[in-house]
Amino acid sequence: MAPTIGVLALQGAFIEHERALERLGVASREVRQRKHLDGIDGLIIPGGESTTIGKLLDVLGMTEPVRALGRAGLPIWGTCAGLILLATDVGRPQTTLRLLDIGVERNAFGSQLDSFEARVPVPALGEEPFPAVFIRAPLIARLGAGVTPLATLTDGTIVAAERDGLLATAFHPELTDDPRFHQYFLDKVAARTAWDAAPETVAATR
């Protein structure tokens, strides 16, 4: 059975992720309420305003359910603001899911006027560098135990990392025509075969 990927649709670039998944022939579901978490096989947290998304997660009673799903092994991918929301340490008080043990520096490359694109080597995706789009992007300043770097800039700055089913990118793969990062996340979802055997995990989110 084809997976259903939830895309957190509270704010930010969620439509672009939906379109990228559609191009790969994968169904997506906009996640706006707790009930929309039921039955998804993976979750994408898009770029946008991390503080706003975090506040909306709290107001809608979704912070703990999403955190519980991540701790139970649901694959979750955060891009840009989504990376911040996955992190344990963001250098300021704000709601995060605290699922991925990384330290983050927000707006590390400047304002939106300083947005740029760079061809970044990502060995996990093959030999061809990835066309990474950075918009008010964070960087990963610290990796915790078990967290693996996936991509770095030429100066060694870490801009993508993973641990098990968790994936974090400082840039926006959904704004390119390159499907490799979305396929990489879908491969994580496919590998998570034990999810369907744990209905009590989904029930805990209700």
Image (tube, helix red, strand yellow):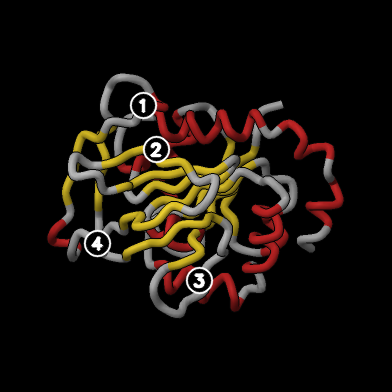
Determine the residue positioned at 37% across, 42% down: 174
Residue 137 quadrant: bottom left
Q: Which residue is mark 3?
A: 54
Between disc 3 and disc 4, the foreground one is 4
Looking at the image, is mark 3 or mark 1 earlier in the sequence?
3
Vertical position of residue 139 compared to residue 33: above or below:
above
Tag nearer the camera, 3 or 2? 2
SS under mark 3? helix
Point 86% across, 51% down: residue:
200
Q: Residues within 10 Å of mark 2 (few under 14, many from 20)?
A: some
Of the pair 205 and 73, the residue shown nearer to us: 73
Identified at 48% across, 68% down, the residue is 53
Q: Which mark is residue 32?
A: none
Q: Which residue is mark 2?
A: 150
Amino acid under label 4?
Ala
On the picture, is 25 further left or further right than 193? Answer: left
Mark positioned earlier in the residue sequence (3 or 2): 3
Q: Which residue is mark 4?
A: 108
Label 2: element kind: strand
What amino acid is found at the position of numbered circle 3 in the picture?
Answer: Gly
Residue 35 lies in what quarter of the image?
Answer: bottom right
Whole-number angstrom distance, CA of label 3 to CA of label 4: 19 Å
Q: In the picture provided, is 39 more to the left or to the right than 30?
A: right
Asked if the residue at tag 1 contacts the one at tag 3, i.e. Cβ–Cβ closer than 8 Å, the answer is no
Quarter in which the C terminus is drawn = bottom right
Report the Cα–Cα distance between label 4 and label 2: 18 Å
The amino acid at mark 1 is Pro
Packing grade of label 4 (10 A; few <14, some 14-19, many >=20) is some
- Disc 1 to disc 4: CB gap under 8 Å: no
Nearer the N terminus, badge 3 or badge 4? 3
